[in-house]
Image (tube, rainbow, N blue to C red):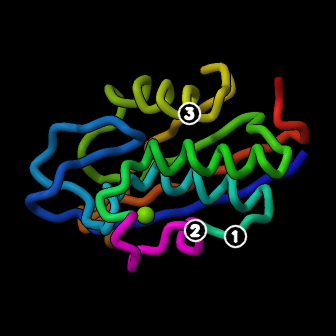
């Protein structure tokens, strides 16, 4: 078994959709980025790459490459799952913390969790999504950014 950690932060700005874990959330601001800026998908993808010792998403999908402009986070995560499978590993479980002062994420957790389970090829019982505010301090607490941390366990054997 292997374990990996992932982190991502994107700035919250006007005029962008807010997409977290593949769920489009109704909110006056969204995350700024070259891709869709889905911090959840990016953090989970980096955790997978980390567990398989395959580098990070910045190496594989550089934000200077026009091919990845507007890249859907779910597509990125699916691609990373395939890369990891080529190294003969498959996800075992996944735990995620989303740091956002606003909006309240409780109503969206089930959909985020289901998206992650589908993309990782896991039963829903092997995926957990937690949400924390920034307690009104720091860039998260002031609503300037949303961040995500993820831990993923990989099992040897690409599966059946
Ligand atoms: Mg990112």
Identify residue for label 3: 119
The answer to whether residue 92 is above or below residue 55 is above
Find out whether the residues at labels 1 and 3 contact each other: C-beta distance under 8 Å.
no
- Of residues 143 and 39, the one nearer the viewer is 39
Q: 127 or 64: nearer the eye?
A: 64
Q: Are marks 1 and 2 in contact (CB under 8 Å)?
A: yes
Sequence-wise first label, 1 or 3: 1
The residue tagged 1 is 55
Percent coordinates x, y for residue 1 in the rendering = 90, 45
Looking at the image, which residue is at 39% across and 63% down? 68
Where residue 53 appears, as percent x and y from the top left, is 79, 64
Q: Quadrant of the C terminus?
A: top right
* Magenta highlight on residue 85: no
Quadrant of the rendered image holding ligand 1: bottom left
In this orientation, does residue 50 appear? yes
Which of the two labelled residues, at mark 1 and mark 2, occupies the earlier sequence position? Answer: 1
Determine whether, in the image, residue 138 is placed left or right of residue 59: left
Whether residue 137 is visible to the viewer of this picture, yes or no, is no
| Callout 2 touching callout 3 (CB < 8 Å) | no
Query: From the Cβ of disc 3, is ligand 1 less than 8 Å away?
Result: no
Residue numbers of the magenta segment: 57-67
Q: CA distance from mark 1 to mark 2?
A: 8 Å
Q: CA distance from mark 1 to mark 3?
A: 20 Å
> Percent position (x, y) of residue 60?
58, 68
In primary-sequence order, the first of circles 2 and 3 is: 2
Instruction: Report the side of 10 relative to 131 (left or right).
Output: left
Label 2: element kind = helix
Q: Report which residue position mark 2 lands on.
A: 60
> Real-space Cα distance between discs 2 and 3?
18 Å
């Amino acid at each position: 078994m292997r374990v990996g950690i992932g982190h991502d932060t994107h700035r919250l700005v006007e005029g962008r959709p807010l997409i977290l874990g593949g769920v489009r959330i109704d909110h006056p601001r969204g995350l700024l980025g070259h891709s869709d800026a889905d911090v959840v998908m990016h953090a989970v993808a980096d955790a997978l790459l980390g567990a398989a010792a395959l580098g990070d998403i910045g190496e594989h999908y550089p934000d200077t490459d026009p091919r990845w402009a507007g890249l859907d986070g779910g597509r990125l995560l699916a691609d990373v799952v395939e890369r990891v499978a080529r190294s003969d590993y498959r996800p075992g479980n996944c735990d995620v913390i989303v740091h956002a002062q606003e909006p309240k994420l409780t109503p969206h957790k089930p959909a985020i969790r289901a998206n992650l389970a589908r993309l990782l090829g896991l039963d829903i019982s092997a995926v957990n999504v937690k949400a924390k505010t920034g307690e009104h301090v720091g860039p998260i607490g002031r609503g300037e950014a949303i961040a995500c941390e993820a831990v993923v366990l990989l099992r040897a054997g690409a599966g059946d």
